[in-house]
Structures are given as C-alpha cells and as structure tokens.
Amino acid sequence: MKRIFKTQYWFVLLAMICLTACQDDTTEELFDQSPSVRADQQTNELKALLLSQPNGYRAEYFTKNDERGGFTIYMQFNADGTVRQTSDFDNQTALANSLYDVRFGTTVELVFSTRNHITKAVDPTAQIDGVSVEIGTGYAGTNNFQFFGNDNGVLSFRDIRNSETATLTLTPTNFTDFDSQSLAEVDVLRENYDKLSSPQSDLPTYPVLEFDNSQGNTRFKFSFNEVTRFSTSRLVTSNAITDLEFGITPTLEGLTVSPPLTYQGEVYEDFTYNDETKRYVSTVNGTTASIYYDFAAAYVNPNDIVVLEQDLGASGFLYRLNLGKNPLTSGTHDSMINLVSNSFNQGLNLNYRVSGYQLILDFESNDCDTFLVLQLYNDVNNNGVNDGEAIGPNIFYCFEAAKINDGKLFLTYTGISNPGLAFTVPWVQPLLDFVGDPDGLIFSREGSFSTNTASFGNTAGTFTSVDSEGNGEIRVYGLFF
C-alpha cells in the first residue's frame, strides 16, 4: 500500500510541474512587452484615432444623466495638441481653440487641459444664456475622460467619477468644412431645443409624454427644466404614482434621452421632430412615445383644488415677470400681459407697465377679501424690461367670495377698490376676463417654484382658463407666498 501511494504522489507532482511550465510559457507570450511600451502603444492608438478625422467629431456629452441633460460639442483635433470647438451649451457658440492631451493613467485618457466649450460643464458657477444652473455644482461635468472603446470609428469615453451616469461619444462629422458646417449645425440644434423649451405662443400649453401601444394610450405629465435639460414625467392613477426621469439633448433630427426611456417592455431613445404635428416621436416595434404640447392636461389631481381652498388661496398667488420664465406660462398669457401694459403705457403716457400681479382668495367673504392686485413699474428705459426702475402704484380689483364647482375655481368681478382709478378697468379687462373666466379656472400644484432664473421652496401652481371650446388657451405659472 505504501509503495502504491508513493507512485501516485510522484505522478501528481510531475503533472503539477508540467502544468506550471505550460502556464509560464503562456504568460511570456501574453506579456512580451513592458507595461510602459503597452501604455505608449494604447496612447498612440487613441491619438491616431482623434487625428484620423481632419474635419472633426460630433460629440454627445451627458454629464450626469440622473440629474442633468446633455450637449453636443464639435471637436477638431490637431497634431500640435490643440482642439477647435463649438457647442450648443449656450448662445456663446463662437469657435475656440484650446489644448488637449492623451495620456495613460489607470487606462488611456483624453484630457482637455485648458478652457473651451466642453469645460463649461466643469464650472461650478456655470450659466446658460445668463442663467445659473446650480451654484457649487453646475453641470457636474469633467475634463478628464477614460477611453472606453471604438465601434467602427465611433469613440466612447466615460467620466472617471460618474462612470455609470456620464458618457462622451464622438462620431465623425464627415464635414468638408469644419468651421462653417459645425456652426450651422449648432444653430439647428439650438432651434430644435427652443421648440421644446420655449413653445410658440400659438401652440397648446400642456406638456405631455404619451405612449401608444397594444395596451392603449397613456399620458404622463411632462415636466422639463430648460436649464438643467432634465425631465421628471409623472403618471398618477388611483393605485400608484409613476415617475420617469431622464436627461435630454437636442439632435439634428429632434432629441435624444438618456437614460433611454423604458415603458412596458419597449425602449425609446431617439425622437424625431414632426413639424406638421409639432411632436417629438420615437417609434419602436409598432409602438410610439411622443413628447408634445396639448390643449388638455395629462391629468389634474382633484386634491389640488381642495388644497387651494383649505390652505394656499389665502396665502396669495404671485406672478412676477422678474422672477423668470417657466414654459408652463403660456405664450397667450404673455401676450395678454403685454396688451395690458401697452394700455397703461398709452393711457397714462408715463411708461407704466405691468410687473406682475397677486391673487388672494377668500371662500367666505364678499367684502373684497378676494381680490387681484395689479403691480406696475415705471419703464423709464422704455425697453419693456423691469430692470430696477421705480415701482408704480398697486391697484386692487375686487371679486365675490371664491367658489369651487366641478373641480374648478370660479371668481366673479365686482369692481375696483378705489373708484378714482375706475378708468383703468378697461385697460385691465383682458386680465379680469382671464381670472373671472365664466367657465372656471383649472388649478394644478407644480411642486417647488422654479424658472430659468430662480428657484424657491415656495409651492408653485398654475391657473388655466377653460374657454367655451375647452382649449385652455391661457395659463399662468407662479408661486404662493
């Protein structure tokens, strides 16, 4: 027995020696170059790829798609270590040159060494067209990207810090003239974005995300921050609240969302703008997802009007021009305010214009405890902008006690508090007609107040008119104070 055991032992030992020898030979074949040589080789390969496109790349950059949208940057890399760029970040689209570097860290990296369009995403005090994004954070971007792969000439990179939520993808432009064609495409991108963020005044006012498939039609309330380029779209049913969150970047055909929208088993990423229907549409396997503005809200929470009666109304609703713009305020409302302003301007010949108004609601008293306060300013610069001029008079217009019927708010105008200012009533009539719409006002809470220039913790809301055709043609967004 001992002799047999010894024989088996030597066979096992011999097999282990042979296996080790084979592994050593394989290792020598895999790593026949030093680490520094391999790093240089990978670095030179990326440099060659960047320089292989003399008319540059079209880069799609999502900085952090769980909080921010994306941008398009045009990049022309040069052998002298410079890169020429333009982008759709903001209205400062002029071409600019800066430095870049390709180096090896934990892997091969593309580094933008000096300021240019892409580094706007790094600035913690970043502004878009003069509007701050988020002080201290900005777009949460980077200037250092790890090379992730090359898919038939399309180069993929990741942010070292946000590898799961940030992507930079470079696609060859195939331009013949980088400067002129990149600037022309940036103009198209900004125009496409404006169609989403600043709808025309003659379009409907309710933003909707709609899905059509074999199970039917489902409409989400589409909420969009035009500065961060991020959307939270909500569906409220009797059983649940469903939120879909994604970043948006404009494309030449429409827009792209990231992360891709997943709904009932289908994935939607690229949307094409249909100029005839005014919709962004993505079609997948016979189903569609559409983003558009509609005459009817995706949904109205019946509890909102109850909260208005029990709490918010008495605190006062405020609309003020210098608090900034929100796309929930319809263009028809802006036109109405301009009409009232022009009437004061012409009637008084003192350049008085509307700076805003307050609406205070009381559901019991008929003694002018429900009233509208019109706020004016003296537009001494005659530019239609409230940029620090003297405040004008406040004028009070009275209503009967507010009433709620069939989920809508009804106000009945009774007269002006100061009879000596009764001559202003015809000038304010369009606003009085809106507030006192005989078909009622639809009220909707809209979370915390946010515009392109300001964000406050105050509750925000909208009032929308319901005209005889049900078009909801005027809507105002403001805050409660």
Image: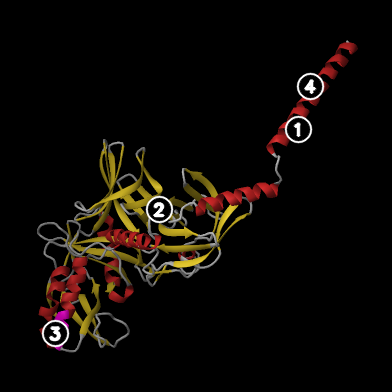
| Label 4 CA crowd tier, 10 Å (few <14, some 14–19, many 20+) | few
Q: Which of marks 3 and 2 is nearer the N terminus?
A: 2
Please, what is the three-letter code of the amino acid marked with disc 3? Gln
Q: Quadrant of residue 110?
A: bottom right
Q: Residue 346 carries which label?
A: 3
Specify start and end residues of the magenta stretch as a single range: 342-348
Please, what is the three-letter code of the amino acid marked with disc 1? Asp
Q: Name the residue under label 2.
A: 173
Q: Which of marks 1 and 4 is nearer the N terminus?
A: 4
Secondary structure, mark 3, is helix
Q: Where is residue 84 in the image (x, y as percent from the top left)?
A: 46, 63
Query: Which quarter of the rendered picture does the C terminus lie within?
Result: bottom left
Asked whether residue 96 appears in the rendered view, the answer is yes
| Label 3 CA crowd tier, 10 Å (few <14, some 14–19, many 20+) | few
Q: Which of marks 2 and 1 is nearer the N terminus?
A: 1
| Label 1 CA crowd tier, 10 Å (few <14, some 14–19, many 20+) | few
Q: In this view, does 156 lie to the left or right of 38?
A: left
Query: Which quarter of the rendered picture does the N terminus lie within?
Result: top right
The residue lying at 13 percent from left, 73 percent from top is 430
Visual colour scheme: secondary structure
Q: Earlier in the sequence, mark 4 or mark 3?
A: 4
Q: Which of 301 and 35 is in front in this view?
A: 35
